[in-house]
Image (cartoon, rainbow, N blue to C red):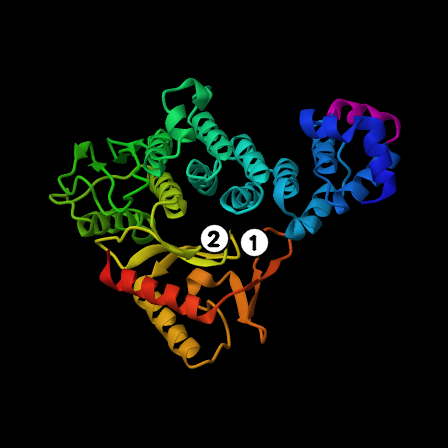
């Protein structure tokens, strides 16, 4: 980090310890920018390139004052691939402000989900409720309530309370002792209860019962395969399944396009609804009704995909697979892959079980034969991960970025072939047994 930034930092914000303890006086920074914009922007760029989160926070303050330099978003995107800890959290936060998108939220969630310093995880837990609500942010806070560190659990619980619209501190509730206690079963119960408070977020009636409507019950983030749903057509509630299979129900958006009554009728009959009228005049809002139902189901399915709730096989800090509950009605199953302390299936952790198991078996056979051409090339679930065994036994990996202008993230972790094979064989056993 350049001397110019360090000198400027001390001049504007004061003693570094007080800045760390009490936060930076960003109003002073904005005032200085009003007098010397070119100087301030130059030293802020140096501070950002040097990895100082205070420089990033300063850019955020300028953005909120409509004074951010035109290259601020590009600068932050350029440093995000190598960012870690609090610095990564702040870069993602300010990018959300500058771009108006929620893509960087996953970067903050990744810090909370990871194995960095507990202070970094607290910063992520405190930041997530201030950012756009996403399935990944909810699930990361749920995982945070299960963290090994008491303070991380405390702030993650507060994050879920805030997102549920409850302006309280968990310390003021009866759950505080369970959150900060040593009983993991009690902590999980609280985590599930707090996330459950958001289960009604997408519940309600979508559409007009006089034409076509779907009434969704609360989501189930932990056994998400079925959900209460009532369907109304032409003012009449249809007879059929009380809790249809969610993946099938969300296919309303696939099989009714283009939305005509014959398409809608055939789809509803396929879902198990009976005694449909021969004809119903659909109003112009029916297409948006279907879109809204699908969006609601997708949001809640995505929350459930990312929750910490499954069978953990291996060591997350090295290599592990975290497998979600079996779906009794389908062949898809959540399978989150961990490598080097991070989730490396950040966008798609739903595996097609027959294909996924076959891919794992192929790799087990190759590894046992001493052939290590690649690592974790297991189909669409691991499409965002490129990893290869090195001659020294280390796995070199690259995690593809999906944020425009942000490069991929790279790393290396040394793994034992025997331990990897043991993890894969146990995962194969779980997936094939359907337990």
Tell whether 260 sits left or right of 71: left
- On whether residue 132 falls in the magenta region, the answer is no
Q: Quadrant of residue 275?
A: top left
Few, some or many C-alpha atoms within 10 Å of disc 2 (few <14, some 14-19, many ≥20)? Answer: some
Dot 1: what SS? loop
The earlier-in-sequence mark between 2 and 1 is: 2
Residue 292: where, in percent of width, then height?
A: 37, 39
Instruction: Give the Cα separation between the discs numbered 2 and 1.
Output: 9 Å
Where residue 70 sits in the image (x, y, percent)? 76, 40
Q: Which residue is mark 2?
A: 347
- Residue at 50%, 34% (x, y): give it: 152
Left or right side of 150 for 359: left
Q: Position of residue 358 (x, y in %)?
A: 34, 71
In the image: residue 11, left or right of residue 150: right
Q: Give the magenta part as a residue range.
A: 25-36
- The quadrant of the picture occupied by the C terminus is bottom left
Residue pointed to by mark 1: 402
Q: Are marks 2 and 1 in contact (CB under 8 Å)?
A: yes
């Amino acid at each position: 980090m350049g001397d110019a930034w360090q000198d400027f930092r001390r001049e504007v914000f004061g003693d570094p310890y007080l800045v760390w303890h009490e936060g930076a006086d960003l109003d002073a920074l904005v005032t200085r920018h009003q007098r010397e914009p070119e100087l301030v922007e130059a030293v802020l760029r140096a501070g950002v390139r040097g990895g100082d989160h205070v420089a990033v926070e300063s850019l955020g303050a300028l953005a909120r004052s409509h004074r951010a330099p035109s290259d601020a978003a590009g600068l932050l995107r350029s440093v995000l691939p190598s960012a870690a800890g609090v610095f990564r959290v702040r870069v993602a936060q300010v990018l959300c402000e500058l771009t108006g998108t929620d893509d960087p939220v996953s970067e903050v969630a990744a810090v909370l989900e990871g194995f960095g310093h507990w202070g970094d995880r607290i910063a992520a837990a405190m930041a997530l409720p201030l950012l756009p609500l996403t399935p990944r942010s909810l699930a990361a806070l749920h995982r945070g309530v299960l963290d090994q560190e008491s303070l991380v659990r405390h702030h993650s619980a507060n994050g879920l309370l805030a997102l549920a619209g409850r302006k309280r501190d968990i310390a003021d509730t009866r759950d505080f002792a369970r959150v900060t206690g040593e009983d993991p079963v009690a902590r999980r119960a609280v985590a599930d209860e707090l996330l459950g408070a958001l289960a009604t977020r997408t519940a309600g009636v979508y559409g007009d019962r006089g034409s076509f409507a779907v009434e969704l019950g609360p989501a189930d983030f932990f056994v998400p395969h079925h959900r209460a749903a009532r369907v109304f057509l032409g003012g009449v509630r249809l007879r059929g399944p009380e809790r249809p299979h969610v993946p099938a129900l969300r296919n309303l958006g696939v099989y009714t396009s283009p939305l005509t009554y014959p398409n809608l009728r055939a789809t509803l009959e396929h879902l198990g609804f009976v005694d449909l009228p021969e004809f119903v005049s659909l109003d112009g809002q029916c297409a948006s009704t279907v879109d809204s139902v699908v969006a609601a189901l997708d949001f809640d399915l995505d929350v459930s995909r990312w929750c910490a709730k499954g069978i953990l096989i291996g060591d997350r800090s090295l290599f592990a697979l975290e497998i979600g509950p079996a779906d009794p009605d389908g062949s898809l199953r959540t399978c989150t892959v961990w490598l080097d302390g991070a989730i490396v299936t950040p966008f798609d952790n739903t595996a097609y079980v027959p294909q996924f198991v076959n891919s794992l078996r192929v790799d087990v056979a190759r590894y046992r034969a001493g052939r290590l051409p690649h690592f974790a090339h297991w189909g669409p679930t691991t499409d965002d991960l490129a990893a290869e065994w090195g001659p020294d036994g280390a796995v070199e990996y690259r995690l593809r970025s999906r944020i425009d202008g942000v490069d991929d993230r790279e790393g290396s972790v040394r793994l034992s072939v025997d331990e990897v094979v043991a993890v894969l064989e146990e995962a194969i056993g779980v997936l094939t047994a359907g337990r």
